[in-house]
Amino acid sequence: MSDSWLRPYEENLPSDTIVMPVVAYRIWYVPLQPILQLRSYWIQTLWEPCARAEAECRNHLTCVCNDDNSFWGGVKEKEGWGSDCKCSAGIYGMKTLDQGFELWRDQLETMHGLDAPEPTTNRVAFGKVFLWGKVLECEKGFRAQYGYPAGIYHTADNSRSLASMYRVPLLAIKDHHRFPIEPPLCP
Amino acid sequence: MSNIGEPQRVIISEPLSDPVPHEVPQERPEPATVPEREPEKVPA
């Protein structure tokens, strides 16, 4: 089930095997204090410390990735969905730091001006992520079967605590002038 | 999530070591040692 959304791609795309995780860049949603945890940004799946995150289709019963359901199998065949999978499951990551940084900055700008009880920088974590298992490489990023944070960039008051909680390095963005707002000083 | 573009290839990633850090076991405190008491001197 966890990789059924990848099957249409496996049949039609070239594949390579590697013995290391793919490293990518992404953002996480951080709930309001006192809850300190990382969640997927849009669907807000919890990323547990010291446990891999696993991709899951949230609409599997009716999704094009479900080959086991005979009713929907017939509908898919009739509609021709099988050859053009629209399932969006996967642990996502961007290929470059700049792409990830742009995503982080865009979300902060979206939040800017909200009447928040704490700095909006505390609500969006930016970091590196390990991706492995079956990984779909796209033009600008990846969709993977499994993922775990590889490091948290020091962009907020709670970055150090998050890195410690997930037992990953606290990373510094050296090019500070790119920050849209004043960042906390890196150690 | 964001638009990551068109799919290009499938990578089968089988890392040699687990990318997930393991929980550090809680250190057990050393058992408290009771200092031996000198036998009380009984007055003769």
Image (cartoon, rainbow, N blue to C red):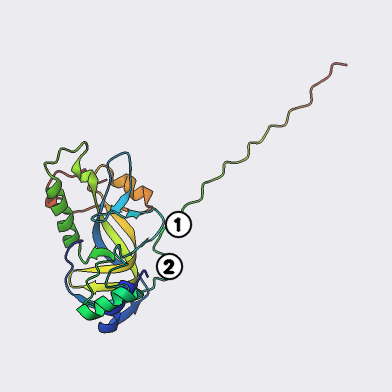
Q: Quadrant of the N terminus of chain B?
A: bottom left
**Residue at coordinates 29% horizontally, 64% vertically from top-left?**
A59
Callout 2 amino acid? Ser
The residue beneath circle 2 is B17
Residue toward you, B29 or B1: B1
Q: Are marks 2 and 1 in contact (CB under 8 Å)?
A: no
Identify the chain of the residue marked 2, using the numbered disc in the image.
Answer: B
- What number of labels is visible? 2
User: Around disc 2, counting alpha carbons within 10 Å, would you say few (fewer than 14), some (14 to 19), or many (20 or more)?
Assistant: few
Q: Residue A148's x, y, as percent?
A: 34, 60
Identify the chain of the residue marked 1, using the numbered disc in the image.
Answer: B
**Where A8 falls versus A92 (above or below)?**
below
Q: Residue A165's x, y, as percent?
A: 37, 48
Residue toward you, A1 or A18: A1
Residue ranking furthest to the front? A71
**Residue at coordinates 53% horizontally, 46% vertically from top-left?**
B27
Residue toward you, A171 or B20: B20
Callout 1 amino acid? His
Residue ranking furthest to the top? B43
Per the model, the C-alpha gap separating discs 2 and 1 is 12 Å
The residue beneath circle 1 is B22
Q: Is A46 on the left or on the right of B29, as rendered?
A: left
**Callout 1: helix, strand or loop?**
loop
Q: Residue A76's x, y, as percent?
A: 25, 77
**Callout 2: helix, strand or loop?**
loop
2 or 1: tag closer to the N-terminus: 2
**Residue at coordinates 23% horizontally, 46% vertically from top-left?**
A123
User: Around disc 1, counting alpha carbons within 10 Å, would you say few (fewer than 14), some (14 to 19), or many (20 or more)?
Assistant: few
Co-location on one chain, circles 2 and 1: yes
